[in-house]
Image (cartoon, helix red, strand yellow):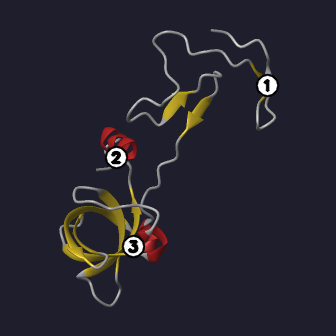
Amino acid sequence: MHIATDIYHHSGVGWISPIENPPGTSDTPDSGSMNYERPDGTVETIRVRLPKKNNREQFGLAELMMGANHIRIRCFDGVTRMGRIKGKIKKRAWIREGDIVIITPWSFQDDKCDISYRYTPPQRDWLKRNKYI
């Protein structure tokens, strides 16, 4: 099915002819792919946030939900810490057991940390494929 009218792309890049996807393609990204082609032919890149070493950030694995926004985290430096979900991501992202997160250990209590970011499954696959985790 072809729609005869052309519409102007929202970013002002050019004209798009809205055509139904050809057989064998879809408008959703491939699972785990950080670059994917949209139906209009443009390639979108998804950015993956990495831990900032100068802020003492590192990867962690959520092991056990403790309640009251606290999670037991197995950090990639070998230490198991009690993680606290920061208020900024408390309402934005649901953290479950088995999720890969970015944590910042407390400077005055090494057995506790703040959770600052949660990776989605495609981002987690990208990290594994590129040997970050």
Quarter of the view holding residue 78: bottom left
First along the sequence among labels 3 and 2: 3
What is the quadrant of the N terminus in the image? top right
Which of the 4 image quadrants contains residue 86? bottom left
Give coordinates of residue 12: x percent, y percent.
81, 35
Location of mark 1 (residue): 7
Spatial CA span between label 1 and label 3: 48 Å
Q: Amino acid at mark 3?
A: Arg
Of the residues tagged 1 and 3, which is closer to the observer? 1
Q: Note whether 120 is above or below 104 in the view shown.
A: above
Furthest residue toward bottom = 108
- Disc 2 residue type (three-letter): Arg
Residue occupying image coordinates x 76% and y 11%: 4
Circle 1: residue type = Ile
What residue is shown at x 34% (from left), y 83% (from top)?
Answer: 106
Give 52 or 6, whichever is nearer the viewer.
6
Q: Nearer the viewer, residue 11 or 111?
A: 11
Instruction: Tell me the tag on residue 65.
Output: none
Residue identifier under label 3: 56
- Front residue of 85/45: it is 85
Q: Residue at x 35, y 69 (%)?
A: 103
Image height of 53 relative to 129, above or below: below
Of the numbered discs in the image, which one, if any, rests on residue 124?
Answer: 2
The secondary structure type at the circle numbered 3 is loop
